[in-house]
Amino acid sequence: MKRFLVKRKTIPLTIVITLLTLSFAAVAFSQALAITTNDFVPFSQAVLVPCANGGSGEIVLVEGILHIQNHITLNGNRASVKTHIQPQGAVGVGQTTGDLYSAVGVTQEQDSIPLLNGAAETTFVNNFRLIGQNADNNLQVHETIHFTIDANGNVTTFIDNFKVDCN
């Protein structure tokens, strides 16, 4: 029968090395990690403006650049993500009338997500406007969505407010 001998000096040294490694890891994981990205993405989208063209409505082709900023923070057992999207130099052309439009607005989303177990929460707010050169052909879209999911995966809160105004 083989016997494994461990010297008494080896055990304390192993414990010290393990504790040092764990303490360095704890310091590294206890601090928040933050990442911010900025992207500029070309986009093209067809939008129905129901009050344009004398109230008959028309499709407006909108083109421009979307500035998309994401800020991500990892802290403890949570990830927080904040997204900000805004059109830059976006213009539209009415496909029936040829009327010109400016596209403006901001879309934001805030997410709190557990990395292991826990509740999650999301809030999304979209404000978008197409501003025409003529009277009564402006479009405004506003939407707010919020939901919460508990640690068991059950949706405990859900709100969706959607409104479209045309003038």
Image (cartoon, rainbow, N blue to C red):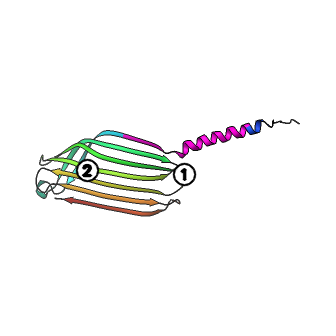
The amino acid at mark 1 is Leu
Residue 105: image tag:
2
Q: Which residues are magenta?
A: 13-37
Residue 137 lies left or right of residue 116; in this view the side is left
Q: Residue 53: x and y, percent? A: 12, 54
Residue under label 1:
116
Q: Nearer the viewer, residue 116 or 54?
A: 116
The amino acid at mark 2 is Gly
Crowd around label 1: few <14 · some 14–19 · many ≥20 (10 Å): few
Residue 154 visible in image:
yes
Q: Residue at x 59, y 44 (%)?
A: 26
Q: Nearer the viewer, residue 133 or 95?
A: 133
Rendered position, 62 above or below 142:
above
Q: CA distance from mark 2 to mark 1?
A: 35 Å
Residue 125 lies left or right of residue 46; in this view the side is right
Q: Residue 15: x and y, percent? A: 71, 40
Q: Residue at x 44, y 50 (%)?
A: 80
Q: Quadrant of residue 2?
A: top right
Q: Nearer the viewer, residue 76 or 50?
A: 76
Which label's residue is closer to the chain start, 2 or 1?
Answer: 2
Q: Nearer the viewer, residue 159 or 86?
A: 86
Residue 94 visible in image:
no
**Helix or strand or loop: what does disc 2 sit on?**
strand
Q: Residue at x 29, y 50 (%)?
A: 106
